[in-house]
Each structure stands twice: as structure tokens, then as C-alpha cells.
Amino acid sequence: MKLATIGVGNAGSKLIDRMIEFEVETGRNLCRHALVINTARTDLAKPQNIPEDRRVLIGDTHHKARGHGVGGDAEIGAEVARTDIDEIRRVFDDVEIHEVDAVLVAAGLGGGTGSGAAPVVIEEIQKMYDEPVYGLGVLPGKYEGGRPALNAARSLQSFVTKVDNFIAFDNDAWRSRGQTIEQGYEEMNEELATRIVTLLAAGEVDESEVGENAMDSSDIMRTLEVGGVSSIGYASTELAPAKQGLLSKFNESDQPESESTDAAKIKGLVRRAVNSRLTVPCEISSADRALIVFAGPPEVISRKGVESAREWLENAADTVDVLAGDDPRPDSSTLAAVVLLSNVTETPRIDEIQSQAVDAQNKIREQDAVREEEIQSLITDDDDDLDPIV
Ligand SMILES: Nc1nc2c(ncn2[C@@H]2O[C@H](COP(=O)(O)OP(=O)(O)OP(=O)(O)O)[C@@H](O)[C@H]2O)c(=O)[nH]1
């Protein structure tokens, strides 16, 4: 697939930057255009793979932003994006939209810029183009507290109703102990970039390498077109240095193994992808459609294995809509299986965020009411004898 990518806010921009890095490292060709949008000048300077003229600062004339971010306020995030929409449109105008299959908009949903500005940006792109728009959104960890949960729950509604599909990443599920927050984010961004790029870059191979089993971009788009929230699973295996063809490459031993062993390994890889940590934990059987991409040297991808892996996933996801195909990478030293579970409707973390958000909203309303009363009581004398000057 060929993408135009837009990172909104700090997390969104870092994710797009990391995707491009992974794409370059692995010789893929996915992000044809990249743009980052932020309300904080310092964060806008962070990406290393985004040209200067593709970085847009919004809200620098807004009295509550002024180039320093919106401090977690999603309403202001949305407001500054609306105010500066012409600037965003102008930069996006340079995108040769006929060169891409879709637009991907990434954001962290817990902050003010990503959660507030990204839905405004999505709306604008949809007015300008007919291409599908996909969302890539990071759900805040529970430990971050009520405000990020409230931003995320509200922004999720805007995202999911607007985009053609929303791929979720759950910071809670990917948090590891004994790391600083920044180290944790770096690792998470790498894991997410690996999954997204391995999945979406399939179908962009050199014409000469296209085999009949190659995944096509239209298969990926078909799987995503059902809308809703999606999750991605991933597993990979290192291949032994190429010796004499297929079996010796898969197994380190020189003993040739039977085709059924190779098939079992392919199926095992897919089971591992689905049963290990998904980008957002979910009930697999609640998926509407699913798709498997095998990225690696074509000669190690056993057809029998692909077929039995596909059948296994059809049962596990309880859907007849499971596609499987290859992303041939002849020189790769790994074989990866990436599984897209599209429109999963049972994701406990989203329920949790919603209830944390409702609690936070109630608390904020109560505090607002109490604060007003307390200020009044503080500035009013006991018998209310005094009047203000103006
Ligand atoms: N996975 C991941 N999550 C991140 C990263 N940085 C921030 N987050 C998450 O994204 C949320 C939003 O943070 P930012 O992206 O910094 O916020 P913003 O959208 O720029 O908005 P403001 O800072 O309020 O202007 C946080 O609450 C975290 O949950 C990152 O590098 N990786």
C-alpha cells in the first residue's frame, strides 16, 4: 500500500517518524508523504525523518497555546486546528493524492493536541479527497489518570465515526516495569511501527518479484473497510543463513525435514502472532474480518502452512473472511507473520477507559461547581455588606 501519513501531536508525530525509520531500515516503501502537526514548537523539532517544510505549527497565535502545546485540553486542540485549518490544507495540498491508496492519521488520544486536532484534520482531508482515511491511535495507560482517559474516550468516538478503520495501540498492555517513560515509549513505538509497516507495506514489492501468492493492497483495504476498531498481532523468527534452499534455511540443522514440519512452523508462527501481545488486547472471535501477511523469503513460506494457518485463524476469529498472502523479501533473514484483526468489538481496555472517563467527567463537573461556590464565599463578607467597585 502507498500512504500519505499525518502525525498529530507529539505521540502521533513520533509514531510516523518511527514508521519511516523502520521502512528505510528494512527497504520498504510505504509512506510516500509525511506531515506532522503540533501545537508545541519544541516537540515539532523532534522528528528526524520529516523534512522541515512538512512540519506544521498550529495555534501559535492562540492565547492558550502560543507554541507551547495545549496542556492536555482537547477542546483547545480542536479549536486551534479549526482556526489554522487553511495552513494545514495548504501543506496537504502538495500531496499528490493520486500517488497514494490511503491516508493514515496517527495521534496519542490522551493529550490535547492529538485527541482534539486529529479529528478536525481528518474531517478536512475527507472533504478534500475520496481516498480512505485510517486512524492509528494510542490509548493512554490507566496510570496516567482521569483527564487522559476522558480525552481518549471522547476522541475515540470522533475517530471511529469518521475514519474508515481505527487501529488501536494500548499503552497499558505494552508498559514494562523498570523503564523510564521515555524508554518505554521508544520501545512501544518501535513495536508498533514494526507491525504497522510490515502489514501495510505488503503489496508494494518490485513487479518482478510478484508471485501469485503475493498480498495485494486491495486485500488489506478490503479487510479494513468494515470500519470499527482493529488490533494487530505479530511474530517473527530468525532464519538460518541460506544454505541449499528451503529447508536448511528454515531449520538450522542440515537434516532436511518433511514438508509437514515446515507447514506446522508456519501455522505455529501465526498462532504465536495472535496469542502474543496484540496492539490492543481483544477477544479474537469478535473480529469481523482478518488478514495474515507473511513477510520473508518466498521459498520458506510453505503453501500448505499458509493454508492451515488461514484455516486455523478462520476458526479462532470465527469468521469466513480471512485472507492470507506474502510480502516477498528474498534477502530477509527473518520470516514475520503479521495478523490484522479488523473490527474487533470486545476490547476490555476500551470499556475501562470509558468508565474511567465518566468518573473523571463527573469529578470535573463537581469540582467546577464547588470551586465557584468557594470563590464566592471567600470574597463575600459574612453579612454581605460590601459591594464590588466595578
Ligand atoms: N506509545 C506512545 N505513547 C505516547 C508517546 N508519547 C505520548 N504518548 C501517549 O500519548 C498521549 C498524548 O501525549 P502527547 O502526544 O505528548 O500529547 P499531545 O497530543 O501532543 O497534546 P498536548 O501535549 O496536550 O499538547 C499521552 O497521554 C500518552 O498516553 C509515545 O512516544 N509513544
Image: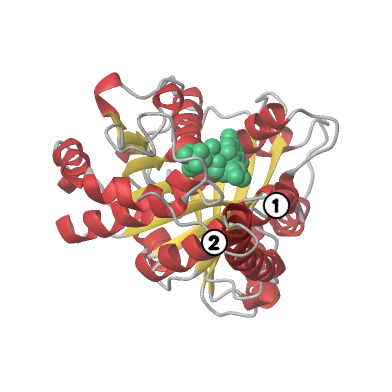
Upstream in sequence: badge 2 or badge 1:
1
State the mark number for residue 354.
none
Secondary-structure class at tag 2: loop
Q: Is mark 1 within 8 Å of ligand 1?
A: no
Q: Nearer the viewer, residue 104 or 200?
A: 104
Q: Position of residue 258 (x, y in %)?
A: 77, 50
Q: Position of residue 28 (x, y in %)?
A: 42, 32
Q: Is residue 75 left or right of residue 289?
A: left
**Residue 328 in view (yes/no):** no
Secondary-structure class at tag 1: loop
State the CA–CA distance, disc 2 to disc 1.
Answer: 43 Å
Bin the neighbour count of mark 1 within 10 Å (Cα to Cα): few under 14, some 14-19, many 20 and up: some
The amino acid type, in three-letter code, at marker 2 is Asp
| Residue denoted by label 1 | 145
Give ligand 1's quarter of the image.
top right
Q: Is residue 355 left or right of residue 8?
A: right
**Residue 43 in view (yes/no):** yes
| Residue denoted by label 2 | 385
Query: Which residue is at 46% across, 26% downward?
Result: 43
Query: Which residue is at 62% across, 60% downward?
Result: 377
Query: Which residue is at 64% across, 62% downward?
Result: 367
